[in-house]
Image: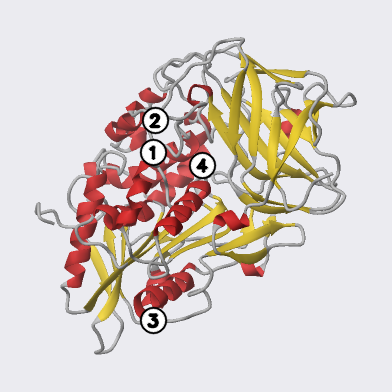
Amino acid sequence: MEDGIRLSTDVFLPSGSGGPYPALLMRTPYDKTRVEDGRMIYTQIIAEAVEAGYAVAIQDLRGRFESDGDFVPFHENPDSDAQDGAATVAWIRTQQWCDGSVAMWGDSYGAWTQWKVAIDGEQKPDAILPSGLPMSALDSPVLRPARRILWYVGRMGPDSRRRAEQGGRSLDEQSAYRNWRTVERSRWLWFLPWKELPDYLLGGLSPHYQGLLESRPGDYLSWMRGCDEFEGPVLLLTGWFDIDVGSVIELHERLKNTRDESSPAYLIVGPWKHMDPKYDLSRYRGSIDFGEDAQWSYPDVLAQWSDFAMKGKSGPLFPGPPIRYFAMGDGSNQWREATRWSEVVAPAQRFFFTSDGGSAGNEGALSEFAPEETAMWTYVYDPRDPVPSAVDEDAYYGPFDIGYMDLRPDVLSFATAPLDQAVELRGSVHVDLVATSSAVDTDFCAWVAEERPDGSSVLIASGFVRGRYRNGIDQEQFLEPGKPERIRIRCRPTVYRLAEGSRLVVKISSSDFPDYDRNHNLGTDPYSDARLVAATQSLRSGPDHPCSVSLPVSRPVR
């Protein structure tokens, strides 16, 4: 680099005396020589790309693993990723083995680094394939401890601790993950206050962690406005069970609005979780097998995309309709195509929260008819006893059974009658509440599920709102205790078919922990104040102020 920092880069070339070749670049903070289960994690990706006639360059980010310098996370120094990435692209283009064309690929953090180079780099790649694109460091205006603390402890901490030579011993990443899951997770996720999390646990990254907690929410999607600066081909790859799937879809819509056919933008959404260095595009999620068609190979996708974007070759995936999405659920589990996401979204049908005289106090019904009388549901949210999140051990979403919530007095359930025929959701579910709290700040959460005749409740999508940010993450407005407030919860988009005889259920509560940090109900800084107090929450649904859910359904539900 211009400042004398050496960025360690491994280059793999096709065998023989051919060349020069188009190049594929991946920049990662997660170790370019990463090994799991006895094999280098990128081996298959590299092998297929090289066999297809590409030079492949994999680089450790500044301050990570074999690269020199100091690591600064992207939320603190976004320009570094743009400058280092652009310099790397320029260097590759000058190499004898490169024909001058360079595309970038990578997952999660590696997806972010691509966009920074594509938007702000003096030298831009010719095409990009960002998988599991994260939209911000917080993912929302609230700390998500299960993911973020694990990221520091398991993903980033081991190398930072090794580089800082903290003590004579350090766990490798796999050992750190195992230690977190089996020993530390149940301890540290309940730790308060978050600002006093010990430095040794964070592997020397405490200053960056503290900086993250001290930052305040803003328009964390503002960087998307700069995507117009990049005119090369783009493939966005994500999954229905990724926290940022909705934002990625919005990004694709923006790209479609600003580009023509000469600058293609593609979107693929499968039944997958957030991408990680394993690039797992599995047919299995939770206890559900989505079928053989759902099992994809990332190396194949990369090779086909590169052939299309770099060589102009046609293949099974490209060219074709800009959107490929996987329709999940009963009798479906199949790939579909579309030109725009707006073409996929089904018309919304509004269902109202009504009381059901034959149900328990924390249950109600979803009716297509507005309530004629006012009904009220009340529960106590105690942050010392939060609703457990429906996530796996690494805090990734999935179609998990949330029937356990029915045992809790702080979870309200509203259900349709059994469906007389299958219904498909296509789009985002919106929940509109008229809510009252005894606290100046609190949270409201919604889960949408398919309650099957066998008694299981399969999670379809969920959403979260912190009261102080109910009108926008850049508009902090506290609640007035006892005053009814309108709260809108937007759930992740989905395409999911509910079976005949099942019921659609919406569950409401005020915590989703440890996926989201608990609200202390005090209105103070949640990261420095360890106090927790209970709040009494009420929903009121009547003729003039109904609570409701808007369902994007394929046909009217009766």
Q: Are marks 2 and 1 in contact (CB under 8 Å)?
A: yes
Q: Residue 321: x, y in percent? A: 53, 69
The amino acid type found where label 2 is placed reads Pro
Which residue is under mark 3?
52
Q: Earlier in the sequence, mark 1 or mark 3?
A: 3
SS at circle 1: loop
Residue at the outermost right position: 358
Residue at 59% in and 26% down: 487
Q: How many neighbours does mark 3 have within 10 angstroms: few (below 14), some (14-19), or many (20 or more)?
A: some
Q: Nearer the viewer, mark 1 or mark 4?
A: 1
Residue at 26% in and 67% down: 10
Q: Nearer the viewer, mark 3 or mark 4?
A: 3
The amino acid type found where label 3 is placed reads Ala
The amino acid type found where label 4 is placed reads Arg
What is the distance, in whole Å, between disc 2 and disc 3 at their CAs? 44 Å
> Going by the image, does 465 lie left or right of 98?
right
Q: Nearer the viewer, mark 2 or mark 3?
A: 2
Q: Are marks 1 and 3 in contact (CB under 8 Å)?
A: no
What is the distance, in whole Å, between disc 1 and disc 3 at their CAs? 38 Å
Q: How many neighbours does mark 1 have within 10 angstroms: few (below 14), some (14-19), or many (20 or more)?
A: some
Which residue is under mark 4?
181
Q: Residue 71: x, y in percent? A: 24, 45
> Going by the image, does 460 lie left or right of 129?
right
What is the distance, in whole Å, between disc 1 and disc 4 at their CAs? 30 Å
Q: Residue 437: x, y in percent? A: 61, 15
Q: In front: 336, or 155?
A: 336
Position of residue 96 relative to residue 416, above or below, is: below
Query: Residue 41's mark?
Result: none
The amino acid type found where label 1 is placed reads Tyr
What is the distance, in whole Å, between disc 2 and disc 1 at their CAs? 7 Å
Q: How many neighbours does mark 2 have within 10 angstroms: few (below 14), some (14-19), or many (20 or more)?
A: some
